[in-house]
Amino acid sequence: MTSETQTSHETPLVEMRGIVKTFGHVEALRGVDFKVDYHEIVGLLGDNGAGKSTLIKTLTGVHTPTRGQIYFEGKPVAINSPHEARELGIETVYQDLALVPLLSIARNFWLGQELTHRYGPIRVLDKQAMSARTREALADIGINIRSADEPVLSLSGGERQSIAIGRAVYFGKKLLILDEPTSALSVKQTQEVLNYTRKAKERGLSVIFITHNIAHVHEVADRFTVIRGGRKVGDFYKEEVSEMEVAHMVMSGTVPERLRIEHPESQTA
Amino acid sequence: MGELTSPAPGGVQPAASAAEDARRATGLRAAISSLVVAGVLCLLFAEQIITGWLPLAERVNISRRDLNWVELLVIVGMVIWGLLTLWTAYTTWRRGATQVATYFADRASRPSPAVIFSVATLAVIGLVSLFLAEQTITGWLALGERIDISRRDINFPEILLIVFGLIAALVSLRTFAGWVQRATPALAWSQWVFLVTAIIGMVIVLSGLFDTPMAIPADGSSIAENIAGLLALVLPGLIIFFSSIAAYQIITAEVDTRADQVVRNLLSRTPGAGAIVGFAAILIFFGVASDLFLEPRALAGALTTNITRGVVAIGITMLMISGEFDLSVGSQLGSIGLFFLLTMTEGIFGLPPFSAIPAVIATFIFATVLGFINGFITIRTGIPSFIVTLGTLLAYRAIPLVIIPEGRILRYADYRLPPPTIEISRVVILIGALLLVAVFVLMGRRLLPRLWRAYRDRHENYTNDTDDFRDLYLFLTGIRFLITAVALAAVIIFLLLGAVNQISQLGSLLVIDFFQLMNGQLDFLPGDVNLRSGVIWWFSLVIILQFILTQTPYGSYVFAVGGNPGAARAQGINVNFVKVMNFILCSWMVAFAAIMDVSRVQSVDSTRGDGLELEVIAASVIGGSLLSGGYGSIVGALLGVLIFGMLRTGLVLIGLNPRIFNGVIGVIIIVAVVINTFVRRERR
């Protein structure tokens, strides 16, 4: 863990308490507690259908929880739409939904908040400034692009994720949620994305890294939260557990004997 | 601009990769084969002059006695050129390199034959261009008659030819000088000269081929009897083509940035690459094939008959980029046109008839409703817009079918009403004109000093300008300033004259015939040129919507919504709003087209606009729009419609059965989409 000096960081950045979400008779989440500290990368692990997407969607305003409370920077909040989540500083990078492939990098970067010249009621794109500042912003976290006017299409999968991360960092977001960012990437590209995730943390962001594969996140995460069947299996700092143990928990949902005393809340009936 | 791979001063030569080597080898082979072909063609040309272009069977008595001195000159020139070309091919083949790079890098090196050939080609191109311009001015007179040099009756194409000839001569000769001084920019310049010359050569070959019927012997036997006649038609073009291609291959075999690669890169950035290529090809093809095609009359016809298609294609393209379709545009055209006519004649919903401007406003409101219905159903139900608008295609068509009795045509003239007019106070026009003057003056104040400074800087720094082509750049910046200044001054003077004209009759109202304004004949043109004001509206709309699409945030949203709705939504864009807005925008374009259509024919019938939807979608696709959304351009759609129009006119002019039109269009759609896909793949 990074050592914190500011007192405000005693409280977590995000805390979700007792989140229950039902869709009709289906209980997708059965009372999950989840938190993310400042400057922390949390790996949110779980098999398909474990409820990790539902949990994150309640945080990003796609779903509203049936029961439970979300605290952001210590204050209770109700997040009713993705827009409100963005207002709070929560940026989600979906694997397929991050960028528009046929638009240029710069236009993607500024999409929805374009830089413009104003001529009365008419707003005209300031393309030069958009290109220049995109290049600067990306170079700032170590992403060097040939030209910001190239279409995103010409980038590799890893580069695309990186640009989306760079965008979140640039716009001063507080929490970055990466939804399965590496599942379709080669080993080398995965490494790139992990590097930029680390860079994002250095810039002061907290990151939730959602994946079903511990191997993708073990290197960068500070802490893991394992979810199975709508319940939390447990929270573990990286030093406490081995990669094998986490992988086993994701599959079986049982916590190894030696960890049970430290995490009594994970011993669910 | 072309860069040399040879060690530039202070530069490091990059290690050539295997792929690079392979590319060079291919380039070299292409250069050698082009050289051989060009050389053989030259010798053939000389031989044919000597023997007098005789058919094979008659070539008994080979040598001619009656050669005049011009023929002798051409024979000598061709033999020299052919031998030089073949010699170049031989030496290049033996050495395995053109040594162009060495020539520029090492001042002490002797020029290789390949270099000499390139320089000679440049000189010939320059001299011929100059000769062409001069002859056009003096009217191709024999030497003895050239007393009164200047002609008075030079027409527009000739002026173009003169200007083009002079510019070509200037650039080629300057580039020639650059080669002599071993200034590297010459390499880049000559690439372009050769590329353009090769295209011209191809056009000459094409035009020769179209004249082949003339080469068929009078006794009606086949062209095989008169190979010499055919040769006489195509040889000059072929020699020009292969010589310039050979020179082009020579100089590009060793440079990094090939001119054609630059063109390809530029094209790959434009969605309408296929349309641009197709447009140029069709224009050249028909221009060569028929003398009538490039006449203002034919071009105006091709434009005027496509106003409706052109304007609707703008809307459909916008909609397609945002990922939706509207199959109902044809039916909308019918019902909106009917609505517009009825508002002015009978009155709608029990209201009295409107005059022109309120009728236009009501029509646009009606169009908004139609577009909104399409958009709303699509968004709310999630049914593909293809199906939704297939339904409204039938539903909207029912409106004119019900209202207009079967087979009848509803005419404005039948109502015995005076033509609709717009009355504007001349004060308003005066103020408008003065405002425009102010805008242009402001524009000039911002633009002209900048251009002048660019010119002055070049002029002042001329002596220590390190660029080798400083003189050419100086000339071009000067010309740019002059043209801008003259154009601005002309517009301002025109507006001021108009304003002064208004002052003299300030008390009266200006009465404009509405039909004339929307789609009337432009009467300042000659009578047989059927260009209508609708064309001006059409092109203005193209410019405005292309601007919105490429230069405003809304344009970005349109691309994003079509390209990846999820990402657009994640960035806070209201996807549904953009889509519905584009449906409405599309209907507005249809309304525009309908009003212009009614203004032209002053009638509506129940089948107006049938089949329009597929034509405009085809035009849009030719123009580079993706059916799946997220990509496209308004200018591309314009070119797509123009291709339609040129084909319709051109096929008739070259005497083909116009019924094959649909077949040709079908082929063109497929070819255009293949080119677009290919170009897009190229850029990855």
Image (tube, coloured by chain):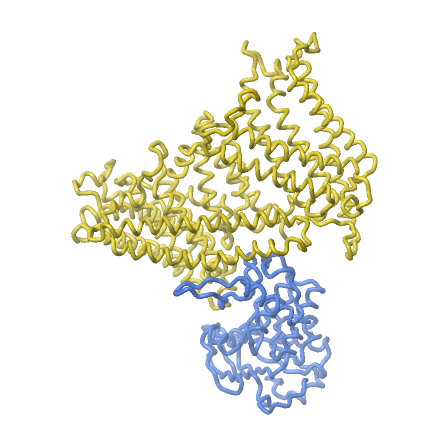
Chain rendered yellow: B
Q: Nearer the viewer, residue B478 or B274?
A: B478
Q: Position of residue B298 (x, y in %)?
A: 41, 32
Quarter of the rendering containing residue A39: bottom right
Q: Residue furthest front?
A: B147
**A221 horizontally vs B498: left or right:** right
Above or below B22: residue A125: below
Q: Residue placed at 72% from the left, 47% from the top?
A: B183
Left or right, B380 with respect to B49, comes to left
In the image, residue A28 lies at what x, y percent? 52, 74
The tally of labels here is: 0
Residue placed most toward the observer, A104 or B399 = A104
Whether B292 is drawn above or below B510: the answer is above
Name the quadrant containing residue A207.
bottom right
Residue B30 in sight in this render: yes
Whether residue B99 is situated above or below residue B293 in the rendered picture? below
When the figure is inspected, residue B413 is found, relative to residue B349, above or below; the finding is: above
Which sits in the foreground, A177 or B163? Answer: B163
Q: Is residue A248 visible?
A: no
Q: Please tell me which residue lies in front, B96 or B64.
A: B64
Which residue sits at x=37%, y=37%?
A: B305
Rendered colour, chain A: blue
> Residue B149: where, in percent of width, then height?
52, 28
Residue B138, position in %: x, y? 52, 28
